[in-house]
Each structure stands twice: as C-alpha cells, then as structure tokens.
C-alpha cells in the first residue's frame, strides 16, 4: 500500500511561493490594509452614532452591538472583496503559467493524473485564499467582542468567503487551462469575477424591471443567487434597517435590502429588533441587533449561492482536467 | 520510403528498405501522420529504433522530428499511424509509456524558486519514485550530470549548460528505458556540448536507449549508432551511417599518399585514371572516385603497389554525417 503523501504539485507550489519574503510581505500588506479599513470604519461608525445621538435619533453614542455588527459586516465584506481581488490573479496563472514557461508538458508526461495536477493547483491557490481568511480571525474577534452578531453569523460569513474563494479559484483554473497566456487567463478571470459581482446586480435589476419593479414575497431575481455579497449579507444576518434608531449602514446593507425576507422588492417589511433601554449616563442596546423575519421553510440564500459556486467550481475543474490532454498547436514543452 | 533524393538532379535509385534490426525494438513507428492545417508536419513516417545505443534523428527545422518525438512521449495525438514504445501504445496506454520513457525537450522547463535538488525531487515524486528512494536517486543523478555542487542552487541561477544537464537528469529521474532528447545541445557552448555528449555516452553504456535529435551533425556522427534522416515529414533513410552510405553512394572515394614526390603522384594518378576512376590531386594527395565499391578500391591499391609505387596512406574518404545528410536530403523548405 502506498503511503499517503502531499500532492507533489501542491508541495512544489507551496515551496515555490510561500517560503520567500513575498508571501510574508503580501500578508503584512493585506493585514495592514484590512486593519486600516477596520479603524476607519470604527471611526466613521462612532461619528455616525454620535451624530444620531446628538440629534436625538440614535440610541447610543459609541461601542456596543451596533458598532460590533457594523464592524463585522464591513470586515467580512472587506475580506471577501480582497479575496475576490487577490485569489483570481493567483489561481488564473496556475496552468497558463505552466504552459507559458513550457513546463506543462513536463508535468503531463509524469505519472500524475490530470485530476491530481488540477487538485494540486487548486490546493495551492485555495491555500492562499484560506490563509488570507484565517489571518483575519484576530481582526474579526475585535469586532465580534463588541456584540451585535452571533458566532453563527461570523462562522457562516467565513464559510461563505472560503467556499466562494475556493470555487472562484477552481473556475480560474478552468479558464487558465484553456488560455495560452497568463495575462489572458488573469484578464478573463477578473472578467468572470466582475460578472459575478456587478453583472449579477445588473441582471437582477433587469429582471426586476422586467417584472414592473415588483416581486412576490420571498421571490428574488435569480442572478442575485450568484452574487457573493448577497450570500454574505444573508449568512451574517445583515439587515437593511439602518439609521433613525436602527443600525449603521454597512457595505452589506444594500445586499441585505435585496434578501427575500426584506422589503426592497416589495412584500413584507421586516422590523428591527432593538429594544432601547436606559443605561447609566446614556443608552444601550440589548439583544443581538437587527433581526430579519426569517422564513424557516426556505433554504437560506447563502446555502443556495454556495451550491451554485460549488457547481461552477466543479465545472471549472472538470474543464481544466479535460484540457490536460494533447492539444494541437499548443507547445507545452 | 519510396525514393532517396540527392542534392543533384540525377535520377536516384530506390534503396532497399533498412534491414530489420535483429535486437528487440525500443520504438517502432508506422505510417505516422500529423497535419496542422495545410501543413503535413509528419507524413507517413516509419521508424525503427532498436533497444540499446544512440539513435539520431537528423533533419532540418520543420522536418517533423519534434512532432514525432512529442507523439512518442504521449504529448501529441497523431492523425494516423501507430507507435509502439517498448510494447506500449502512447495513445491507448499513455501511463505505461510515461513510466518507461524520459523526455528532454529543446527548452528547459524552469520552476523559479526551487533548488536543483528540490526540482529533481519534485519530478521523482511526480513519477512515483518511492519516498525512501528519492534522496538516493536525486543524488545519483546530480552526480551523473556533475551538478552535485549545485544541489542547493536555485535552478534559475544555473548557466544554460547546467540547466540542460539538469533537464537531462530530470528525464532520467524514473530510470526510463528509453530517453527521447530533442536538440539537447542547442544553444550550448562547445565545452557544455562535450560534457553533454559524454553523459549521453555514459547513459548508452548503462543500457538506456537514446533517441536524440540535433542540428549539429558532427556531434551526432560521433554519438549515434544508427540515424534516420528526416525531411518534409518523411524518413528518407535510416540505419547505421555505413548502411545509408552504402545505399545512397554509388562511388567510393579514396585518398592516397605516396612517397617519391610529384612524379610518383602523377604515375599513381595515371594508373588510377586508367582503372576508370575520376582522379584529382589536392595538397599532395590523390583523390580517386571509383565505381565498384570496396572491391574496386582493393584492386586499385593492388595495382599501385604492383606498379612499384610506395603507398604510405590509402583510406576511404567516407565523409561525415553532414555529407551523408546533404547527399540524402534535397533541402525542402516548408
């Protein structure tokens, strides 16, 4: 029986990419940017809440669950944005890069099976994305301790980011397998990401407009289910009930407004779940922050989105695996 | 193979097909055809590479050498024809072929950031060399290609010659029985070429069958036991250089040196001319093109000695692979 060993392609990629200074520098910059954005968000939210309190609209001046939820939603949205920005560039270069440097043929004539090569590449690309998500945990903890979000919201949010990142990497590898040049693969993959983030919104708006800007309760344009921020808004239980006594609007607020149990497309209006109580010198919040009226009979949006991404990701890998056969006119050595 | 064209316009006799090798075949190709659009990269190509020794694929750029090699190592599907690599079909049994064939392409596949040792270890792993055997195998290969002192050096930092030697080591990482090397000496300086040639010889001595292509014909001349001359996607001739020469050359050329100065040389020239040869005198030597093969050459020597001419040197001018190549090919440019 053969002993289990790390996929050689994955091992080589890890050796090649991770032991140099570049990985450490990238991580440092990533955390620096994220930390900076978090501080900026905190300052903005505090100012906003203070302003509301001064005008007599808001319940609280600083800290507390509203701030915690706001920071967590923005942090997770920021991580998702950065992962969507970083992961495709790295993953798209995987097979096209091998072809460009004339090593793909050398890899193909080894005893590695196409699936093994593709999974090794996916592992290398995903490991990077997963690391980016993991190193965010301490930052998430600072937001999480303020309250306003459940552990479930945080874990579901992280799950959405990780699965989306891995599946986009898989799609990028599929694209990479069909292109001759790394540049082409990277451009095409970023195009794909743009379609998933922006294109789905345009498609959703088009469908909504086609239905005279009104949809039945719980019904939402189908394209939204392929939007990663839409899924993240659902996974983190983000709410559109902000301002005038509600939460602070975050990056996810517009996406939350489009969720099936919100009212942006018509239908039932969800009520914010805040109770305002006196708290010493000021006001405080109790409860877990804004809540949406959840319809327990339907599959959560985030689960549907992840399923969609898993299917797309699998198709990407299948395409990549099938592309690793002899191809006319493409020199691979 | 239907005819052998010459560089001149004379009609060419059809040579007999090469005798079937008596040793088992390492590679047999029949009717291999590959088209790219309107271009016939390989056109009904037949090849017989016996086990053991060095087999040279000689031909101009675009002759179809690389296409043939790529099809052999499972990197290309031909349109037609069959290939047998040590009993395996590259199209239906690619893994079996990959297990017994090593490939050295004309470019060095570089993985930035890996040392020579890690580079070979990666490929050994990919070829399923057991983990416990890998360090020993890698060390042996580094020693074979004389790169032990560079084992911790980044592959990107090696000279071209060293990279090519490492590439050769990579092709041998799973102990293949057949090594296919496409222009391995291309772009190397003379010293690096000599070093590479010595390694190839050493491998052949170890029993590895080597199929090698090169533009540097003088190099193949020294190295190869058998050659195939390829042009426009077809094999024009194959066999040992002597077999091919025998098939395509109607006349023998001998050079003769004699004692006795110009008078003796003139006498010898007269004698050779009367025997029916075309005789020229160059640099104090007699150069005779005589019809009739070795028999005629022996007769000429007997006649010279019988006439009292003191012959100091009598040798057949066989010409190198280069001359043979030029006499077989017609310089088809595609």
Image: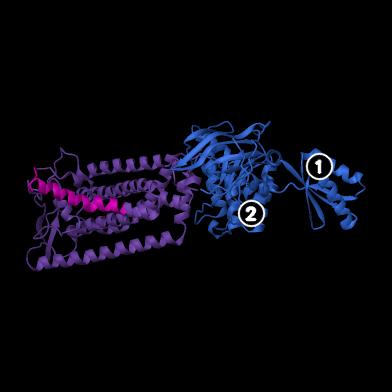
Chain colours: A purple, B blue
What residue sits 26% from the left and 42% below the top? A308
What residue sits 63% from the left and 59% below the top? B189
- Using the image as rendered, state which of residue A33 and residue A104 is in the foreground: A104
Horizontal side, residue B130 vs residue A196: left or right: right
What separation in Å lies between label 2 and label 1 (alpha carbons)? 52 Å
Does any portion of residue A134 appear in the rendered image? no
Discs 2, 1: same chain = yes
User: Which quadrant of the view contains residue B176?
Assistant: top right
Residue bearing the label numbered 1: B297
Of the residues tagged 2 and 1, which is closer to the observer?
1
> Where's residue B48, x and y in %?
61, 35
Residue bearing the label numbered 2: B148
* Contact between labelled residues 1 and 2, with CB atoms less than 8 Å apart: no
> Where's residue A151, x and y in %?
25, 49
Numbered disc 1: what chain?
B
Check disc 2: other Cα within 10 Å, few if <14, some if 14-19, many if 20+: some
Does any portion of residue B237 appear in the rendered image? yes
Horizontal side, residue B53 vs residue A229: left or right: right
Numbered disc 2: what chain?
B
- Using the image as rendered, state which of residue B235 and residue A111 is in the foreground: B235
| On screen, residue A47 above or below B171 | below
Which segment did they paint magenta?
A: A189-216
- Using the image as rendered, state which of residue B329 and residue A35 is in the foreground: B329
| Mark 2 or mark 1, earlier in chain | 2
> Where's residue A100, x and y in %?
45, 52
User: Which quadrant of the view contains residue A120?
Assistant: top left
Whether B269 is among the magenta residues is no
Q: Main secondary structure of the magenta part?
A: helix
The tally of labels here is 2
What residue sits 51% from the left and 51% below the top? B109
Whether A212 is among the magenta residues is yes
> Where's residue B329, x and y in %?
61, 45
């Amino acid at each position: 029986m053969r002993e289990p060993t790390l996929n050689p392609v994955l091992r080589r990629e890890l050796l090649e990419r991770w032991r140099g200074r570049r990985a450490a520098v990238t991580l440092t910059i990533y955390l620096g940017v994220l930390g900076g954005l978090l501080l900026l968000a905190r300052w903005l939210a505090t100012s906003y809440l203070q302003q509301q309190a001064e005008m007599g609209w808001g319940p609280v001046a600083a800290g507390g669950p509203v701030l915690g939820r706001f920071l967590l939603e923005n942090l997770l949205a920021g991580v998702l944005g950065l992962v969507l920005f970083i992961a495709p560039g790295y993953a798209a270069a995987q097979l096209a890069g091998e072809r460009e440097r004339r090593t793909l043929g050398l890899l193909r004539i080894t005893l590695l099976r196409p699936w093994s090569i593709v999974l090794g590449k996916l592992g290398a690309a995903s490991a990077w994305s997963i690391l980016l998500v993991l190193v965010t945990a301490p930052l998430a903890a600072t937001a999480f301790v303020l309250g306003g979000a459940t552990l479930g919201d945080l874990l579901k949010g992280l799950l959405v980011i990780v699965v989306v990142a891995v599946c986009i990497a898989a799609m990028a590898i599929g694209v990479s397998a069909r292109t001759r040049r790394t540049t082409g693969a990277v451009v095409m993959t970023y195009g794909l990401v743009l379609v998933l983030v922006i294109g789905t919104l345009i498609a959703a708006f088009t469908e909504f407009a086609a239905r005279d800007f009104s949809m039945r309760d719980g019904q939402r344009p189908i394209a939204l289910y392929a939007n990663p921020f839409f899924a993240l808004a659902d996974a983190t239980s983000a709410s559109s009930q902000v301002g005038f006594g509600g939460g602070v609007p975050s990056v996810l607020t517009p996406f939350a407004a489009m969720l099936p149990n919100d009212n942006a497309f018509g239908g039932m209006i969800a009520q914010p779940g805040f109770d305002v109580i006196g708290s010493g010198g000021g006001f405080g919040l109790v409860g877990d922050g804004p809540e949406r009226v959840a319809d327990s009979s339907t599959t959560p949006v985030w689960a549907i989105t992840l399923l969609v991404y898993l299917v797309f990701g699998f198709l990407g890998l299948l395409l990549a695996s099938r592309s690793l056969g002899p191809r006319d006119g493409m020199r691979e050595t | 193979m239907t005819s052998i064209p010459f560089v001149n316009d004379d009609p060419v006799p059809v040579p007999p097909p090469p005798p079937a090798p008596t040793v088992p075949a390492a590679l047999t190709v029949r009717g291999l055809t590959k088209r790219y659009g309107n271009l016939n990269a390989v056109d009904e190509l037949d090849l017989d590479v016996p086990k053991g020794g060095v087999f040279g694929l000689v031909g101009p750029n675009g002759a179809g050498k690389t296409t043939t090699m790529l099809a052999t190592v499972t990197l290309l599907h031909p349109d037609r024809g069959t290939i047998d690599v040590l009993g395996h079909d590259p199209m239906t049994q690619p893994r079996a072929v990959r297990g017994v064939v090593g490939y050295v392409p004309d470019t060095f596949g570089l993985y930035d950031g890996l040392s020579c040792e890690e580079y070979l270890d990666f490929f050994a792993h990919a070829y399923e060399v057991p983990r416990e055997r890998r360090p020993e195998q890698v060390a042996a290969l580094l020693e074979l290609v004389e790169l032990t002192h560079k084992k911790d050096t980044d592959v990107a930092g090696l000279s071209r010659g060293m990279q090519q030697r490492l590439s050769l080591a990579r092709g041998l990482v799973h102990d293949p029985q057949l090594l296919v090397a496409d222009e391995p000496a291309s772009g190397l300086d003379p010293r690096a070429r000599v070093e590479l040639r010595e390694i190839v010889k050493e491998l052949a001595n170890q029993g590895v069958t080597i199929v090698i292509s090169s533009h540097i014909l003088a190099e193949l001349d020294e190295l190869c036991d058998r050659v195939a001359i390829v042009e426009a996607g077809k094999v024009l001739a194959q066999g040992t250089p002597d077999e091919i020469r025998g098939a395509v050359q109607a006349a023998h050329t001998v050079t003769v040196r004699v004692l006795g100065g110009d008078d003796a040389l003139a006498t010898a020239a007269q004698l050779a001319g009367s025997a029916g040869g075309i005789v020229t005198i160059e640099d104090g030597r007699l150069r005779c093109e005589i019809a009739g093969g070795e028999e005629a050459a022996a007769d000429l020597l007997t006649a010279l000695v019988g006439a009292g001419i003191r012959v100091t040197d009598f040798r057949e001018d066989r010409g190198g692979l280069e001359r043979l190549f030029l006499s077989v090919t017609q310089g088809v440019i595609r």
